[in-house]
Image (spheres, rainbow, N blue to C red):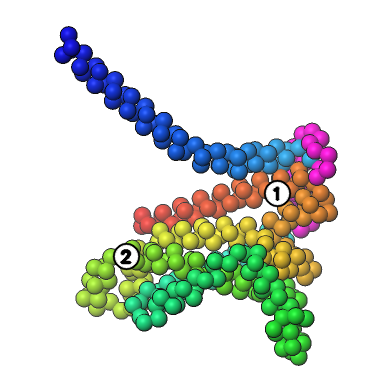
Amino acid sequence: MSTLSQPAALRQRRRGRRATGALAGWLYALPTALFVLGLFLIPLALVVQMSASDWPLLGGNQGWNLPQNYSDAVSNRFFWDSVGFTLKYTVLTTVILLALSLGLALLVQESTRWKGLLRTSFLVPSALGLASASLLFYVLYSPIAGPFAGLMKSWGFTFLGTPEGALWSTIFLIVWRYAGFYMLLMLVGLQGIPDDVYEAARIDGASRWQTFRTITLPLLRPTLALTTVLCVTGSLLAFEQFYILTKGGPDNSTITIVQLIYNVAFQGQNDLGIAGALSVIVLLALIVINVAQIRAFNRKAED
């Protein structure tokens, strides 16, 4: 009797251990799940509700207002200008950051005497918060209190006084702030490429450019995909640097789409419904752009 019941008891103990392991796994995942629920899913649902409602800043929900908020959002006089400027800023920032960070990663990859110093020097700016870095550059660019004030006065130019000057001054800040961070990601990807592949290329007589084009870039594609998605997403959601440096000026020429959302919600219109509609539009655009990027990189990897 005891012999026949032994397998059943063993199966029961195994089921108990599996149940205990599953419970432990759920308990480990619970803090992250609560974090995602409280700081992402619930706010996202609230924004979607706002985008479909007549929701002034003061007064709360006044009833459904769909699709009026979306038509008002698209017909805003700054909408298409902000979209165009954001896309222009994103393309310029992404190209410059990726090219520079890859160049820096290739530079510090070599085993030279100054390798540690160079890596640290390039990475230090990324430890500074973006708002703090923007305030620092705001002072540097100041025509009154900045270190270049005398030079700007004698030459008759300002960093932030023209649309192009404000754009490139902000791009310089972002490149200074983030180049070291993306360099670190590129460096990790470069160090993951086996040395045997480079050795075989050298034996075959491949030049440095041929090695870079046929070995480094293809094997670095996953890292390039990650950095591109991060850079594009961060650029499309740009806010702090322009809010601190330019306030959208001069002449509303540097208003990003996120700054437009802020202005609609808290300045001028004070309409959370239209701001919510703009937020949903930006979210959908981000999803489409990121999916397109990932598919493009995957297609190239398969080819």
Secondary structure type for disc 2: loop
Q: Quadrant of residue 23?
A: top left
Image point (44%, 34%), residue name? 26
Residue 278: give its label: 1
Q: Of helix, strand and loop, which mostly describes the magenta segment?
A: loop
Q: Is residue 85 left or right of residue 267?
A: left
Q: Is residue 203 left or right of residue 236?
A: left
Indicate the quadrant containing the N terminus: top left, top right, bottom left or bottom right: top left
Image point (69%, 65%), residue name? 242
x and y, in percent, of residue 15 in the image: 31, 24
Q: Which residue is mark 2?
A: 193
Q: Quadrant of residue 112?
A: bottom left
Q: Are marks 1 and 2 in contact (CB under 8 Å)?
A: no
Visible residue check, residue 76 = no
Is 64 covered by the magenta stretch? yes
Q: Is residue 168 left or right of residue 152?
A: left
Range covered by the magenta-colored residues: 56-79
Q: Amino acid at mark 2?
A: Ile
Image point (24%, 68%), residue name? 196
Q: In the image, is residue 60 above or below residue 81?
A: above
x and y, in percent, of residue 199 in the image: 24, 72
Q: In the image, is residue 282 above or below residue 96?
A: above
Visible residue check, residue 303 = yes
Q: Quadrant of residue 105?
A: bottom left
Toward the viewer: 48 or 287?
48
Q: Amino acid at mark 1?
A: Leu
x and y, in percent, of residue 37 in the image: 57, 38
Is 270 covered by the magenta stretch? no
Q: In the image, is residue 229 above or below residue 4?
A: below
